[in-house]
Amino acid sequence: MAGSRDFFNRRLHSLLGVIPVGLFLLVHLTVNHFATRGAGSFNKAVNFMENLPFLIVLEFLLIYLPLLFHAIYGLYIVFTAKNNVGRLSYFRNWMFLLQRVTGVITLIFLAWHVWETRIRYALGQTELNYDMMHDILSSPVMVVIYLIGVLSTVFHFANGLWSFMVSWGLTVSPRSQRVSTYFTMIVFLALAIISVRTIFAFI
């Protein structure tokens, strides 16, 4: 019984990391990337998202609750996983370790980012606009923190896609897993470039 429950939880953890949390990440990066077109374009994109009907309900059902489960069960995996990097230095073992490390970094960064944006906005301490992010990233320390946090997040998502495809039987053969490795590396590079351009657009 415990084994089947753990199997179900791991599959659910993997699924939620891609749908809906991963999809939200892509939407979030897309909206933020409007900053590369100027403050007006970014503010317009943010206003569109903020005026979606039933936004609070959608955020809790499609973002916060799935993210909470993914984060809590992810921490369980981090502290119970047996890493083989010291004994078997294969590429996938390193990816396994990096997935856990970036997961913890991402969780810490997301908690800080949500506080700096959504919670402070809900408390009436800031506005969700270009100036908010410009003020946050006016500090070189915060630029470094955001670079580390965002790059960890997109790596965790891209590498998690590889695990998702394996877990759900989409890539069974060694060749398909090798192809998916190249695919997820391309996804990471593309999202990393978009993310870095966005951060510097606010500066």
Image (tube, helix red, strand yellow):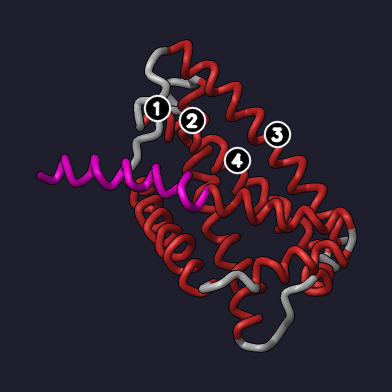
Q: Residue at x 57, y 37 (%)?
A: 158
- Determine contact: label 1, label 3, CB under 8 Å: no
Instruction: Name the amino acid type tagged 4.
Output: Phe
Instruction: Name the amino acid type tagged 2.
Output: Trp
C-alpha gap between disc 1 and disc 4: 17 Å
> Can you identify the residue that label 3 sits on?
189
Give the magenta-colored segment's residue range.
1-22
Q: Residues within 10 Å of mark 3 (few under 14, many from 20)?
A: some
C-alpha gap between disc 4 and disc 3: 9 Å
Q: Is residue 17 left or right of residue 133?
A: left
C-alpha gap between disc 3 and disc 2: 15 Å
Which sits earlier in the primary sequence, circle 4 or circle 2?
4
> Can you identify the residue that label 1 sits on?
166
Q: Count the marks: how many?
A: 4
Which sits earlier in the primary sequence, circle 4 or circle 3?
4
> Can you identify the residue that label 2 sits on?
162
> Can you identify the residue that label 4 sits on?
155
Q: Residues within 10 Å of mark 1 (few under 14, many from 20)?
A: some
Instruction: Name the amino acid type tagged 1.
Output: Val
User: Of circles 1 and 4, which is in front?
Assistant: 1
User: Of circles 4 and 2, which is in front?
Assistant: 2
Which sits earlier in the primary sequence, circle 1 or circle 4?
4
Residue 141 is tagged as none
C-alpha gap between disc 4 and disc 2: 11 Å
Residue 143 percent coordinates (x, y): 78, 59
Instruction: Name the amino acid type tagged 3.
Output: Leu
Q: Residues within 10 Å of mark 2 (few under 14, many from 20)?
A: many
Residue 104 percent coordinates (x, y): 50, 52
- Determine contact: label 4, label 3, CB under 8 Å: no
Question: Of helix, strand and loop, which one carries label 2?
Answer: helix
